[in-house]
Image (cartoon, helix red, strand yellow):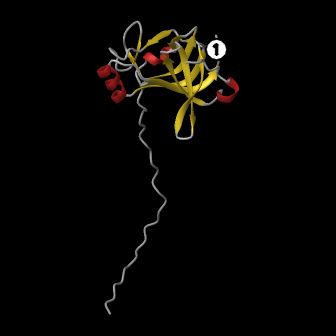
Amino acid sequence: MPIRVLDWDAVLGHRVRVYRNLNNHKISVQAKRGAGWIVVGHVTELVLADTSFYVSAASQARARNANTRNVHAWATGWLVAELDPSIEAPISLKYNYKTDNSFVDRQTGKALSACRYLVVRQNCVFVSADALQEPVAPKLTQLKLKPLNVKPCRFGLSLGVA
């Protein structure tokens, strides 16, 4: 399988989907084209912002039952840089379709669903520390309503029968 060099100018700042390509051992980058996603390149270093992780349960079950590999787990986010050394991503990410139902922290095994940054350095995948935080539900605030400035009035309704 040929390795396609990513045209950074064409996809920088766009929402992309990435996954580990098990044939060439690089990260495949897909961009939305029409109704589907197409591979636009392969990289060993990149940064995604506002990243979410997905695992298709049906495709994962097919892979487990047939003991074959297929693309059923990926991350989506905004492609922001080839590599920015100022972004901290201390958590090593892993996914094994045979044992994991989601992407997990390599050290603790805790499931991850989203993070601020996903960083690929030298073909190794890391995520920002906020990936380990529990999602915070938005706080509901009680509305303080002011009384409406409505003057009481009398009105009558006349129903006539013809």
Residue 143, position in %: x, y? 43, 43
Residue drawn at (65%, 14%), measured in percent from left and top?
A: 84
Whether residue 26 appears in this view of the structure is yes
Residue linked to disc 1: 83
Left/right placement of residue 61 relative to residue 48 reads left
Above or below — where is 34 with respect to 157? above
Residue 41 screen position, x and y as percent? 60, 22
Residue 83 percent coordinates (x, y): 64, 14
Quadrant location of residue 154? bottom left
Q: Could you say which quadrant of the image residue 117 lies in?
A: top right
> Which picture quadrant has residue 9?
top right
Q: Is residue 118 visible?
A: no
Residue that extends furthest to the front in the rendered view of this protein: 1
Left/right placement of residue 16 relative to residue 64 reads right
Question: Residue type at mark 1?
Answer: Leu
Residue 14, position as x, y percentages in the image: 62, 31
Task: Please state which of residues 95 and 35 is positioned toward the viewer in this rendering.
Answer: 35
